[in-house]
Image (cartoon, rainbow, N blue to C red):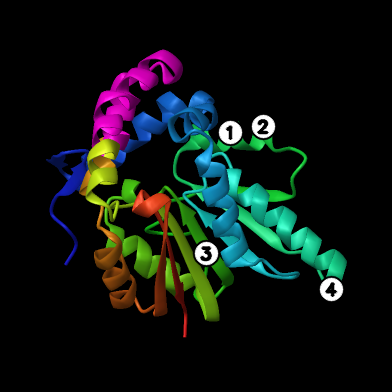
Amino acid sequence: MKDEVASFGLRDVEPSEKRRLVNGVFHSVAERYDIMNDVMSFGLHRLWKDAAAARLNPQPGEVIIDCAGGTGDLAARLERLARAARRRRGGPSARVFVIDFNTRMVEVGRSRRRGDDILWAVGDAQTLPLGDASADAVCMAFGLRNVVEVAGALAEARRVLKGGGRFVCLEFSKPINPVVSKAYDRYSFGVIPIIGTAVGRDREAYRYLVESIRRFPDQARLSELMGHAGFSAVSVTNLAGGVCALHQGWAI
């Protein structure tokens, strides 16, 4: 049974309302989303995405889906790695797709990444416009917490993967050190909204993004949900002491 309520930040709302509200958040921040990621994470998000792309290990000829891919920051890394692998090994070009439900994010990403061989589509992570067993790899970076139903998005990622395909999820998580956790809370609720006002020009949007992290499943719970969705050999790697976590699962 689908969830009757969904979390929008610290509030519970109707699922259709969350979809509308989240769409509004990303429409508002699309133009400044990339620079805000740099400012908020002190550039660490670049290292985390490098780690996620390396873990996914794109290969020539593969179909790779960057789900909730926003402006294509991770997809560009995947495309470059696939191209490098093709130069070493030969074979056909990989096809890297960005699928995001926010039209404005897709528009901004497409305009900024004209030099990258990326395919773009507007679509919902819970109803991907793909056939069963049609992709070799699916990744999500900082997008899973924005879907209406996390379990539904995980099940959909599993559906579109071929046998032996892999899923990588990069998401903010729960710090494993209590001192780091307290400092992270103070920074998140005290500083990020101020940065959101000064740089992102939308305090409420960035307050939602901070609150959404607090409501998101921790490392153990997300691993459990991935198992329920049908992923095997689920693993998690904590980054920055658990501020961010890299989850991986296999379609076996």
**Quarter of the rendering containing residue 21:** top left
Please name whichever residue, 38 or 127, is drawn nearer the observer in this view of the structure.
38
Residue at screen point 27% across, 29% down? 207
Q: Which residue is mark 2?
A: 111
- Residue type at mark 3: give it: Val
Count of numbered circles in the view: 4
Q: Are marks 2 and 3 in contact (CB under 8 Å)?
A: no
Q: Give how far across and how far down residue 120 sits, in percent.
A: 61, 47
Label at residue 223? none
Query: For the residues carrying marks 2 and 3, which lies nearer the camera in this image?
Result: 3
- Residue type at mark 4: give it: Arg
Residue at screen point 28% across, 56% down? 176
Asked whether 208 falls inside the magenta stretch, the response is: yes
Q: Give how far across and how far down residue 116 sits, in percent.
A: 74, 45
Disc 1 element: helix
Between marks 2 and 4, how big is the CA–CA gap? 31 Å
Query: For the residues carrying marks 4 and 1, which lies nearer the camera in this image?
Result: 4
Q: Earlier in the sequence, mark 4 or mark 1?
A: 4
Q: Are marks 1 and 2 in contact (CB under 8 Å)?
A: yes
Label at residue 138? 3
Query: For the residues carrying marks 2 and 4, which lies nearer the camera in this image?
Result: 4
Q: Earlier in the sequence, mark 2 or mark 4?
A: 4
Residue 144 shows up from this direction: no
* Residue farthest along the front direction in this orientation: 179
Q: Give how far across and how far down residue 85 sits, in percent.
A: 78, 66
Using residue 53 as the reference point, say whether residue 150 is left or right of it: left
